[in-house]
């Protein structure tokens, strides 16, 4: 079990029957997606240009992982996106 799998397993154990929310940057998100640990994603897009960073969906195996939009809320300050993560057999 790698680091992200262990961290999520510990969070699930501590949460009991409650949902586990994993927050982090693009790298942590990529690791969780690639390990098949994500059932749902909520992204909050704020129109601020930072000039650099890690792309969230870069290095993601799109043959195995897909997204289904379940909700979009557009506000003047941000766009809130919710996706169901589709895990396809490899």
Image: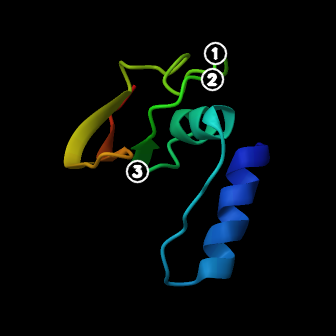
| Residue at image coords 60%, 57% | 22
User: Any mark on residue 37, and which?
Assistant: none
Q: How many C-alpha atoms fall within 10 Å of the one at disc 2: few (<14), some, or many (≥20)?
A: few
Foreground pick, 27 / 54: 54
Judged from this view, the residue extending furthest toward the front is 76
Q: What is the C-alpha distance between the residues marked 1 and 2?
A: 4 Å
Nearer to us of marks 3 and 2 is 2
Q: Residue at x 23, y 39 (%)?
A: 68
User: Which residue position is annotated with label 1?
Assistant: 51
Counting residues from the start of the chain, the first of labels 3 and 1 encountered is: 3
Horizontal side, residue 23 vs residue 17: left or right: right
- State how the image is colored: rainbow
Query: Could you tell me how far apart the alpha carbons at marks 3 and 1 are, in whole angstroms?
Result: 23 Å
Residue linked to disc 2: 50
Quadrant position of the C terminus in the picture:
top left
Q: Say if mark 3 contacts mark 2, CB within 8 Å.
A: no
**How many numbered marks have been drawn onto this rendered protein structure?**
3
Q: Which residue is mark 3?
A: 42
Indicate the secondary structure of the residue bearing disc 2.
loop
User: How would you rate the neighbour count of disc 3 (Cα within 10 Å): few for under 14, some for 14-19, many for 20 or more?
Assistant: some
Task: Say whether marks 1 and 2 touch (CB < 8 Å).
Answer: yes
Secondary element type, mark 1: loop
Residue at point 61%, 33% (across, down): 26
User: Residue 64 in the image: x percent, y percent?
Assistant: 38, 26
Q: Position of residue 7 (x, y in %)?
A: 74, 57
Question: Could you tell me residue 84's position as x and y percent?
Answer: 30, 48
Given residues 47 and 88, the one toward you in this image is 47
Residue drawn at (67%, 63%) of the image: 9
Q: Give the mark, 3 or 2, whose residue is nearer the N terminus.
A: 3
Q: Is residue 42 left or right of residue 31?
A: left
């Amino acid at each position: 079990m790698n680091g992200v799998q262990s961290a999520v397993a510990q969070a699930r154990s501590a949460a009991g029957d409650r949902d586990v929310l994993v927050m982090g940057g693009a790298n942590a998100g990529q690791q969780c997606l690639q390990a098949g640990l994500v059932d749902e994603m909520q992204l909050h897009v704020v129109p601020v240009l930072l000039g650099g960073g890690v792309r969230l969906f870069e290095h993601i195996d799109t043959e195995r992982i897909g997204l289904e939009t379940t909700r979009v809320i557009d506000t003047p300050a941000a766009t809130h996106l919710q996706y169901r993560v589709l895990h396809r057999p490899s």
